Image: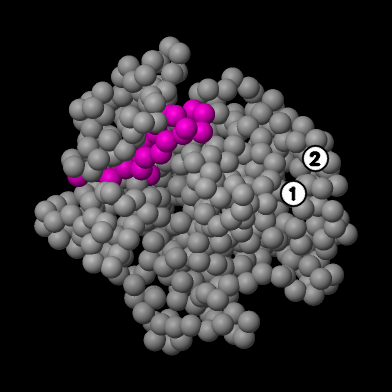
Amino acid sequence: MKLYKHPHGRVFYRKMDHGRPQISHGEGIYLYDESGKRYIDGSGGPLVVNVGHGRADIVQAMTRQAQKAAYVHALMFTSQPVEQLSAELAELVPMPDARFFYLSSGSEVVEGAVKLARQIQQARGEHGRHLVVGRWQSYHGMTLGALAVSGRAGLRAPYLEMLRDMPHIAPPYPYRDPASGTEAADRLEAAILEHGPENVAAFIAEPISGASLGAAVPPDDYWPCIRQICDRYGVLLIADEVLVGLGRTGAWWGIDHWQVQPDILVTSKGLAGGYFPLGFIAAQHSDVELIRQTLGDWNHGGTFSHHAVGCAAALATLHIIQREGLVENSARMGALMGQQLRAALGDHPKVGDIRGRGLFWGLELVQDRETKRPFPAAQRLDWRIWERAFDLGLVVYHSQGCADGRDGDLIMLGPPLIVNEAQVTEMVTLLAQAIGDLL
């Protein structure tokens, strides 16, 4: 099997010292490289490929729209896919009378959401509200604005002098933090009071923590308390559903598990199933209309915003999710995955915690279960397990730094939502073998 590694040809990669095979094709939850080796896509790309590889109906929908009009600028035209997708999504997002703005990635929609929150506050006459509170050990994207509200130390470090940094609070992290949901939410109130309610525009958080904390689910009283605190101080609540939205956690949106309504919701990864880079910002019509009446326009944009081909792909993806009952399948197969992970690895002396919801699961690895002492980052345990699983034909997601921003190894599973029982069993078996081979 040939491996492509930097430097080769005229390509460079984010991870430069890692050889990678060249992909030939994908089908369902499987990927095949040019040598014919099969890989189970246990991380969905990561967490992008929600309806599986090789879906001809999505490709056909994109082709039909591309043949009609591949690109039109959103300043000048609208298109049928944009209008229809928005109408159908409005029936699914947890806010009344929603409006949608489409961009190309999770980083872009988070950046846009932060700007939107600022302009909603300006339209309300709250011109001093410019701070957006985030959480430590969170991740919201790679643009400078998204990094400013993110709390992942390693990704922020090279750019700290370039950021207009924002306040951060500790996240709910039941494995390492015994605080109740109410106690964890009170950290937001303390931050608002510290910085002055008149200066705080919004709070942004992932409903269920993503890659930085490995599917850490907050206590059930956390999100209702957060909503109450935001209402008390006039702070907008931004739900970052880039990773956990569109059925990933066994509900349409991660925030749905607590019946909490955000003021702004963003998603991206699975919106077009990996067939097109697309995400959206959802906001209440009343807030969008207030900007129109007060400020005239929203001061933001993007060359590829409201892309007709992208929205055609998203519409076809949405219809597959609905037609095949993939949100429900995520809940069923996710419960099975959790049971099997605990049966296979729950007693492993180096597996400290197994957590998740729906088809989004994380395993936190520790040197000692009693003390929860993490492995040193220099051992690169997460990467070594990833490599071993990859050799075995299983693609997982890995992350480091959950314990303190530097140490703490995570391995995550987030396969396409089409997965069946036999495939869940095979993934868990291969992951258990990879961990057993190294620990």
Q: Position of residue 430 (x, y in %)?
A: 22, 35
Q: Tell me the kind of residue under disc 2.
A: His
Q: Quadrant of residue 214?
A: top left
In primary-sequence order, the first of circles 2 and 1 is 1
Q: Residue furthest front?
A: 161
Helix, strand or loop under label 2: helix
Residue at the spot 62% in from the left edge and 39% down from the top edge: 135
Residue at image coords 53%, 53%? 141
Whether residue 208 appears in this view of the structure is no
Q: Relative to 172, is 283 above or below?
A: below
Q: Tell me the quarter of the picture where residue 78 sits.
A: bottom right
Task: Determine the CA span between mark 2 and mark 1.
Answer: 9 Å
Question: Residue at image x 43%, y 12%?
Answer: 370
The quarter of the image holding the N terminus is: bottom left
> In what quadrant of the picture does the C terminus appear?
top left
Nearer to the camera, 144 or 331? 144
Q: Quadrant of residue 259?
A: top right
* Magenta span of residues: 393-414
- Give neighbour class at mark 1: few <14, some 14-19, many 20+ (Cα, 10 Å): many
What residue sits 78% from the left and 67% below the top? 291
Spot occupied by residue 157 in the image (x, y as percentages of width and height): 53, 44
Image location of residue 265, percent across then percent down: 62, 54
* Above/below status of 24 relative to 408: below
Relative horizontal placement of residue 294, taking residue 1 as reference (left or right): right
Determine if the magenta segment contains residue 395: yes
The residue labelled by disc 2 is: 195
Q: Mark 2–mark 1 contact, CB under 8 Å? A: yes
Residue position for label 1: 131
Label 2 Cα neighbours within 10 Å, binned few <14 / some 14-19 / many ≥20: few
Q: Disc 1 marks which amino acid? A: Leu
Secondary element at tag 1: strand
- Nearest the viewer among 86 and 23 is 23
